[in-house]
Image (tube, coloured by chain):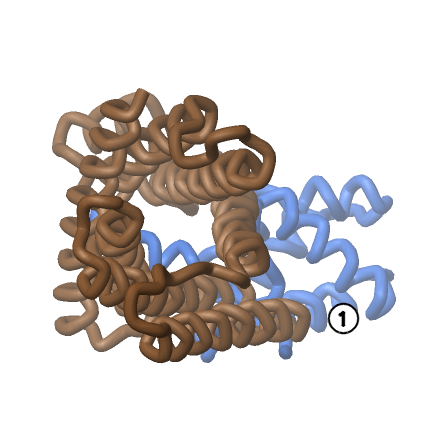
Amino acid sequence: MADSQAFEFVCTALEERTSLDRLAARGTVRIALKQAGLEARTVSPDQMAVVLDRILPAELGSRGIDGGEEVCAAIATGVSGLSGGDTGETPDAVFQRLGGGS
Amino acid sequence: MKLLALAAALCFIGVGGLVGIRLLLLARKTRQLPEFAVGLGFVCVGLIGYPLGLMAQSPDVPLGLAKLGFAGGNLATAIGSIAIFVFTWRVFRPVEVWARVLAFSCMGVLGAIAVHSVVSTLMLEAGARPTRPFMLPQQITVAVSYLWTAIEGIRWYGLSKKRMALGLSDPQVANRFLLWGYAGLLAAGGIGVSTLRLFTAPDPLNDPVAMLAIGVAGFGSAVVIYLAFLPPRFYRRWLVATA
């Protein structure tokens, strides 16, 4: 199954704005998502914005990319304009409902 | 020990039934598959299959009623276990091919055994008690469903803990994943031990180890299912306060 719109958007933007190639960009974003407990297939724009703010700058820094915070902030602006897309219902949403919408 | 096992069974039947009915009512409102599947699972296994199975085993029950309980219990347990497979597959692994293959294979095994059990019971000669020739594959398949449930629940609890650190997950939902995982472990453990003792103990129906396993699994499952799906207000508050 395809990865989410937010994931594809961030990977493409990283390729364009940094020296990372396609494979490295996707790998970096996947590692950041894993640290956040998220998956490429279901990550939403809101969740991706948090990853861009809190995790990805350090990941870029560890790969020798300067100005990671500025790059991530610029990409986050674009992410905020994305719709959620059809990522399917997550287990989080299901278990929220099963407990009475707590 | 028999009293402990009986009390645990009653607890499990009560809580499983209550939670199952609540989730089916939720499904009627939301029209969503997950709550229907898990609600059906609890009702069929806890409220129908388990009590009918217990009744059918009792030597004091008339033969006709025992046959009816045996066939009905087997059928209900199979439907409930199939529903749990559907829930785990559709909620946690909706796109993975291996998950679809595992779910359909196990559902096929359970369905075939249930149909065989009902048909062979109906065709029994007068005076003959029903037997379970495919008990071992049936028990193993049901245990697989609960083990899978446990693995996914605990895995998602781990993911949710990472998300909580970023403010991306609700502590109550994270805890619900953990409790769901524990419920799966308890059920798989209870089934595993009692099935093993059925084949190894000198007097399987009065075996204290099997009864203890059933007791612990029954009580434990009732508690975690209750906290997961009918959490009292103090428990919710405690989860939020300690997150």
The residue tagged 1 is A16
Q: Is residue B8 left or right of residue A35?
A: left
Question: In the rendered image, is residue B160 in sight?
Answer: no
* Residue A10 on image: x %, y %: 64, 66
Question: In the rendered image, is residue B97 in sight?
Answer: yes
Q: Is residue A74 above or below residue B153?
A: below
User: Tag 1, which chain?
Assistant: A
| Chain with colour blue in the figure | A
Q: Is residue A68 above or below residue B30?
A: above
Count of numbered tags? 1
Q: Colour of chain B?
A: brown
Q: Residue at x 46, y 76 (%)?
A: B116
Q: Residue at x 43, y 42 (%)?
A: B187
Q: Is residue B38 left or right of residue B236?
A: right
* Near-viewer residue (B36 or B13): B13
Q: Is residue B226 above or below residue B30?
A: above
* Residue B101 on image: x %, y %: 63, 74
Label 1 crowd (10 A; few <14 / some 14-19 / many >=20)? few
Q: Residue at x 42, y 46 (%)?
A: B168
Q: Is residue B240 left or right of residue B161?
A: left
**Kind of residue at badge 1:** Glu
